[in-house]
Image (cartoon, rainbow, N blue to C red):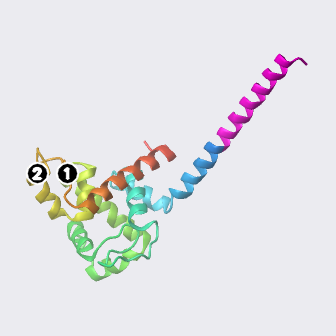
Amino acid sequence: MNHRTGGKLSLALLTVCTLLLLGAMAQALGFYHRMAYPLEYQALIEAAAAQYDLPPELLYAVTRTESSFNPQVESSVGARGLMQITRDTADWAEFRKGTGQDLDVAYDRLFEPEANIQCGAFILRLLIDEFGTVDNALAAYHAGWGNVKKWLADEEHSSDGVNLSSIPFGDTARYVKKVNETSRIYRELYQFE
């Protein structure tokens, strides 16, 4: 074998090894993303998404962001369960549903994954219907319905009264950005349409 042939063979071998390494890295990255962005409570989340005409990736993103899929978590302000719903928000949702369910029972059930996901999905649907966009709904989910109403009426935060151009609460602005990014990752990772 001459020097020129040996060089071509070495280059071909290097190319094959590089491609194999890149393929293995892509597979490892996909595995990492699936571990970091799991499809926890898949049947419950996807059923609620279908019931309330919501993108499943949005429910996964809110749940991951709010609780990291821990159904027993409770915040310092009493937000409970997977989608971190407060007593006032749970009461508002029950009132809007008009079921007449005992409000204490509804709040106590927020540690149950199915009840929490159903309530959270219902709230998101109401907020999207009320505010017209996912971003506005996420801001209301995080900072409250009343705050978003005020921001939309303030030209400093909304030039058209329909879309928020800025969110004055830094933690809410970061929340909306994080949920949107997480939703994008879920959509791309699991090919949600």
Cβ–Cβ below 8 Å for labels 1 and 2? Answer: yes
- In this view of the protein, which residue sits in the foreground, 112 or 21? 21
| Residue 20 covered by magenta stretch | yes
Q: Position of residue 80 (x, y in %)?
A: 36, 75
Q: Which mark is residue 94?
A: none
Q: Residue at x 78, y 21 (%)?
A: 8
Going 52% across and 57% down the picture, which residue do you hit? 36
**Amino acid type assigned to the residue bearing label 2 in the image:** Glu
Residue 118 picture location, percent across and down = 36, 65
Write down the residue under mark 1: 166
162 drawn magenta: no
Residue type for callout 1: Ser
Side (left or right) of 3 relative to 77:
right
Q: Which residues are magenta?
A: 1-24
Which residue is most to the right? Answer: 1
Can you say which quadrant of the picture contains the C terminus?
top left
Q: Give the Cα separation between the discs numbered 1 and 2.
A: 8 Å
Q: Secondary structure at mark 1?
A: loop
For marks 1 and 2 on the same chain, the one whose residue lies earlier in the sequence? 2
Asked if residue 187 lies left or right of residue 95, the reply is right
Residue 93: image quadrant is bottom left
| Residue position marked by numbered label 2 in the rendering | 156
Answer yes or no: is residue 181 visible. Answer: yes
Question: What secondary structure is the magenta-colored segment mainly?
Answer: helix
